[in-house]
Image: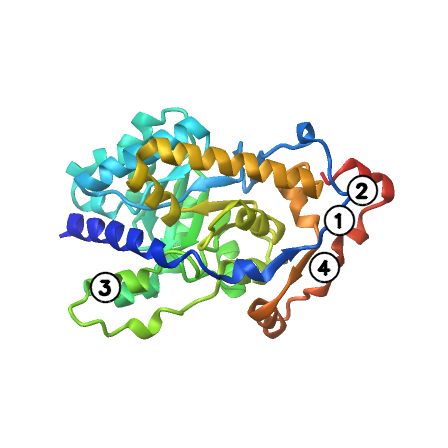
Amino acid sequence: MIANRKDDHVRFAAEQQRDLGGYNQFDDVSFVHHALAGIDRSEVSLATRFGGIEWPVPLCINAMTGGSVKTGLINRDLAIAARETGVPIATGSMSAYFKDESVADTFTVMRRENPDGFIMANVNATASVENARRAVDLLRADALQIHLNTVQETVMPEGDRSFGEWAPRIEKIVAGVDVPVIVKEVGFGLSRETLFLLHELGVRVADVSGRGGTNFARIENDRREQADYSFLEGWGQSTPACLLDAHGVGIPVMASGGVRNPLDVLRGLALGASAAGVSGLFLKTVLDGGPTALISLISLWLDQLAALMTALGARTPAGLARCDVLILGGLRQFCADRGVNTRRLATRSRSYRTIHESLGGIE
């Protein structure tokens, strides 16, 4: 039954990609163009550091799948692409492994194909400390993701209905494992209040994973005999909204959910993310063209990201958080309602940049 569900998730997630090429709230973020801000390409580094983690690039293949024969083959291809491009990668939820150890290979294939890469194991918030350690040990994982998916569980016919112990369990896992813990949503966003709580629980990094990408409420509704939760398709906050809401919280954040191209990665970094994650688009790419197609796409993205940073004068991903950006449309209204000062984002380069610094680029 779990294997069938995992295969269903992959099929429905890939089908959703046909509908995700249009507008989302990343389009409400616009860079102020400064025509003499550019620097030399040789000065740009894509390396990023956050929450005790160091990555060579600010992009990862985010959590997707595992637990069936078909999804094991997908994980193999994803891991090959990660190995050849140097991007970090996460497994999908390892709950299936905790229930049936015979599916371990559908996850360990990632480490076998990518022996020296940065790999994140993924568990849900109901996992015990023992199972969290098992997941990390199985993959020799460099970090542990804990996913939050109350809305998905609510719509899932066989889903969990008890959420009250999630926060205490997260705190225990954080204290009980020896790798950084990243808590992520699955596509409905993390609010400022949730981020404050995660910070108090000792979580190193939060992946806001907002609305705009794969919609797991829709996926689970498609699995129901009666599609009686379709009214939840617009639930949650977008990724840009979550990033803006996160300002001042004090926990490093990642941007995933609705990332369609290198410009969206750039926008996420400019709004304060330390890195961006992509799932659905990369999944469709590997299903359509195998690891070779995904390697080509990721390589192109990294090259374009460095080129855009060069034009903006940002030597590092962190430097993008000092670029001037305009917040438009519905995203601006969200900021007004949540008390986020958007005017300072449009003029923030003035607060630190002298003429000499402007010519030298942003650190």
Say which residue appears at 68% left-offset and 64% top-offset. Answer: 342
Above or below, comparing residue 287 to residue 239 in the picture: above
- Mark before the other along the chain sequence, 2 or 1: 1
Secondary element type, mark 3: helix
Q: Earlier in the sequence, mark 4 or mark 1?
A: 1
Disc nearer the start of the sequence (2/4)? 4
Measuring from the top left, give residue 353's x and y in whole percent. Answer: 81, 46
Q: Residues within 10 Å of mark 4 (few under 14, many from 20)?
A: some
Q: Who comes first in sequence, dot 4 or dot 3?
A: 3
**Considering the numbered disc 4 on the image, is that residue within a helix, a strand or a loop?**
helix
Disc 2 versus disc 4: distance between alpha carbons? 16 Å
User: Which mark identifies residue 254?
Assistant: none
Three-letter amino acid code at disc 3? Asp
Count residues near mark 1 (Cα–Cα under 10 Å), then give few for <14, some for 14-19, many for 20+: few
Estimate the spatial distance between the alpha carbons at disc 2 and disc 3, rounded to whole Å. 52 Å
User: Which one is nearer the viewer's eye here, 127 or 296?
Assistant: 296
Q: Which amino acid type is marked by label 2?
A: Ser
Label 2 close to label 3 by CB (< 8 Å): no
Q: Which residue is mark 3?
A: 222
Please say if the residues under marks 4 and 1 sit with CB atoms less than 8 Å apart. no
The circle drawn on residue 346 is 4
- Which circle's residue, 1 or 3, is located before the other in the chain? 1
Q: CA distance from mark 4 to mark 1?
A: 12 Å
- Which quarter of the figure has residue 158? bottom left
Q: Residue at x 86, y 43 (%)?
A: 355
Q: Select label 4 or label 1 by which is in front.
A: 1
The total number of labels drawn is: 4
Alpha-carbon distance for marks 4 and 3?
42 Å
Q: Which mark is residue 358?
A: 2
Residue 4 horizontal side relative to residue 80, left or right: left
